[in-house]
Amino acid sequence: MPIKKEDIQILAYRQYKYNESYEHICWRLAELTETIKINITNGHDVEALESENLVFFLKNDTLIEPSRDDIAETAEKIYHNSPEKSKLHWFIAEKTLLLEEIKKALVRNG
């Protein structure tokens, strides 16, 4: 099911309202990105600071959690790219919705 732009906008606005620190936002985006990457076969195509338009194929029957080191490495890259908070909120919302779709697919396939 395609992710709707309106759903991304709503979730991005909610992220904005939390008023989290920049470092925490970078970490959250890195965590989502790495979780998606490790759970789909074309995960190497997933970039933290890009919008996704993926058709994904699951690697396993259960959700795999990324290592803390992989998350930290990605978070550092995000932080050093210095994107504005609004873009980070957008990418977090988008990847949150994508990860929800992955979780739904795991339940359907499980």
Image (cartoon, rainbow, N blue to C red):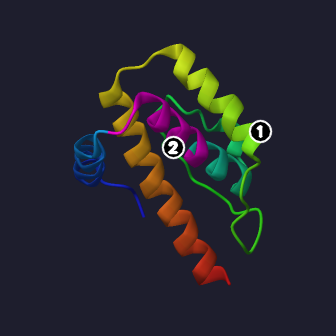
How many labels were placed on the picture?
2
Name the residue beneath numbered marker 1: 69
Q: Position of residue 22 (x, y in %)?
A: 42, 29
Name the residue beneath numbered marker 2: 28
**Side of 57 relative to 29 (left or right):** right
Give the structural element (helix, strand or loop) at label 2.
helix
**Side of 2 relative to 31 (left or right):** left
Amino acid type, label 1:
Asp
Magenta span: 20-32
Q: Quadrant of residue 88?
A: top left
Q: Give the distance between the C-alpha atoms of the residues marked 2 and 1, in whole angstroms.
A: 14 Å
Residue at point 26% right, 40% down?
16
Q: Position of residue 64 (x, y in %)?
A: 73, 62
Membership of 48 in magenta stretch: no
- Quarter of the image that includes the C terminus: bottom right
Q: Is residue 18 above or below residue 81?
A: below
Residue at point 35% right, 38% down?
90
Residue at point 74% right, 75% down?
61
In this view, the residue in front, 24 or 58, is 24
